[in-house]
Image (tube, grey):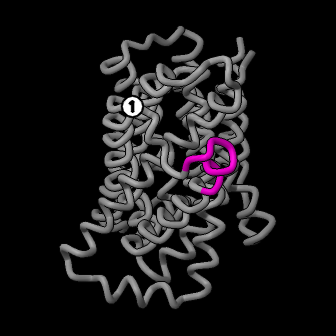
């Protein structure tokens, strides 16, 4: 019954791993080169998947309107949003970058109302704000000293990149749903394999547009040699492979699948639990202390999530 909500929670776990991989890779080769590397990898992974299940590497059967709106989504979500996100990882770290990603749910909800005419129930609206409050409280609770630094000493550029990332993620998700709605009109609904592959095919379209966008930026700025040099960093490339699998390939595809089964604002809110989940590897892997304030924030977030199921 809550297929979209369950998928959204799974995406949050997937994006936690993505954030950790991409923060490491981005600090080694830079956000611009990381974006085109991971999108190229995603195109290959998605192409192989589509070839196995549909016989086509690129979904030319999607139709003109589907391609148009998915291309718009790819430009907003990948070229603008993800460039901002990975730049924020480099400048202020993945934890603070994920904090600003909590702007995605309200951005998606507002864009969903304006573009798709979506409506949200009172419980859903309440759950969204309670969850966002819990996320913010938990992340801020990572240390008063760190938060004071964020308020006064974090670079303005990093903060602006974080804001752009959150808005780009939310708005891009809504245009993805619009594009997939048109895509579904060209699919045989009795063919369960074809229906299941729509999110993966849609992600392929978005990834192609995103990669072309970053390639144009690199060629325009005459940084082709630097891109080739970045490919020689084996540690960064290995981390990029892991981040790509859990992000553009698995996470993004399932995020598009989630909005097929629930409203964009709800899906985006549940996916925004990544800042809470990232506390787990922070504690067990990086041995970082988790405060009582963070635990309370996590409990509030879980309470907010539960409102979606009432």
Residue under the image location 61 percent in, 85 percent down:
235
* Residue 130 as seen in the image, left or right of residue 37: right
Residue under the image location 47 percent in, 19 percent down:
185
Q: Which residues are magenta?
A: 48-56
The mark tally for this picture is 1
| Residue receiving disc 1 | 63
Residue under the image location 72 percent in, 30 percent down:
6
Q: Closer to the camera, 268 or 190?
A: 190
Whether the magenta-drawn stretch holds residue 193 is answered as no
Say which quadrant the C terminus sits in: top right
Whether the magenta-drawn stretch holds residue 51 is answered as yes
Q: Closer to the camera, 234 or 118?
A: 234
**In the image, farthest residue toward the front:** 55
Residue under the image location 24 percent in, 75 percent down:
219
Q: Is residue 151 visible?
A: no
Residue 138 x, y percent position in the rendering: 62, 46
Residue 22 x, y percent position in the rendering: 55, 68
Q: Closer to the camera, 267 or 210?
A: 210
Task: Give residue 229's quadrant in the image.
Answer: bottom left
Say which quadrant the N terminus sits in: top right
* Residue 161 as seen in the image, left or right of residue 199: left
> How packed is label 1: few (under 14 Cα within 10 Å), some, or many (20 or more)?
some
As helix, strand or loop, the secondary structure at mark 1 comes to loop
Residue 89 x, y percent position in the rendering: 47, 66
The correct choice, above or below, for 296 with respect to 304 in the image is below
Residue 37 x, y percent position in the rendering: 47, 71
Q: Closer to the camera, 113 or 249?
A: 249
């Amino acid at each position: 019954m809550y297929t979209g909500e369950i998928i959204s929670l799974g995406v949050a776990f997937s994006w936690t791993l993505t954030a950790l991989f991409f923060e490491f890779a981005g600090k080694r080769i830079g956000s611009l080169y990381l974006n085109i590397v991971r999108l190229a990898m995603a195109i290959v992974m998605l192409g192989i998947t589509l070839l196995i299940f549909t016989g086509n590497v690129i979904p030319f059967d999607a139709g003109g309107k589907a391609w148009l709106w998915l291309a718009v989504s790819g430009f907003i979500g990948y070229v603008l949003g993800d460039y901002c996100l990975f730049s924020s990882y480099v400048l202020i770290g993945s934890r603070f970058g994920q904090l600003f990603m909590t702007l995605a749910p309200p951005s998606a909800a507002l864009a969903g109302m304006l573009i798709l005419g979506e409506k949200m129930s009172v419980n859903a609206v309440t759950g969204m704000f309670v969850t966002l409050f819990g996320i913010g409280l938990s992340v801020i609770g990572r240390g008063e000293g760190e938060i004071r630094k964020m308020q006064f000493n974090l670079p303005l550029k990093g903060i602006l990149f974080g804001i752009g990332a959150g808005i780009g993620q939310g708005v891009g998700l809504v245009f993805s749903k619009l594009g997939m709605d048109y895509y579904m009109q060209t699919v045989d609904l009795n063919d369960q394999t074809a229906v299941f592959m729509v999110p993966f095919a849609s992600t392929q379209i978005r990834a192609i547009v995103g990669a072309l966008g970053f390639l144009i930026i690199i060629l325009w700025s005459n940084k082709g040699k630097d891109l080739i040099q970045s490919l020689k960093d084996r540690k960064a490339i290995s981390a990029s492979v892991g981040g790509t699998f859990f992000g553009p390939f698995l996470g993004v595809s399932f995020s598009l699948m989630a909005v097929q089964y629930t409203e964009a604002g709800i899906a985006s809110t549940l996916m925004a639990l990544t800042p809470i989940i990232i506390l787990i590897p922070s504690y067990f892997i990086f041995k970082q202390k988790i405060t009582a304030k963070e635990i309370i924030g996590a409990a509030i977030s879980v309470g907010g999530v539960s409102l979606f199921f009432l």
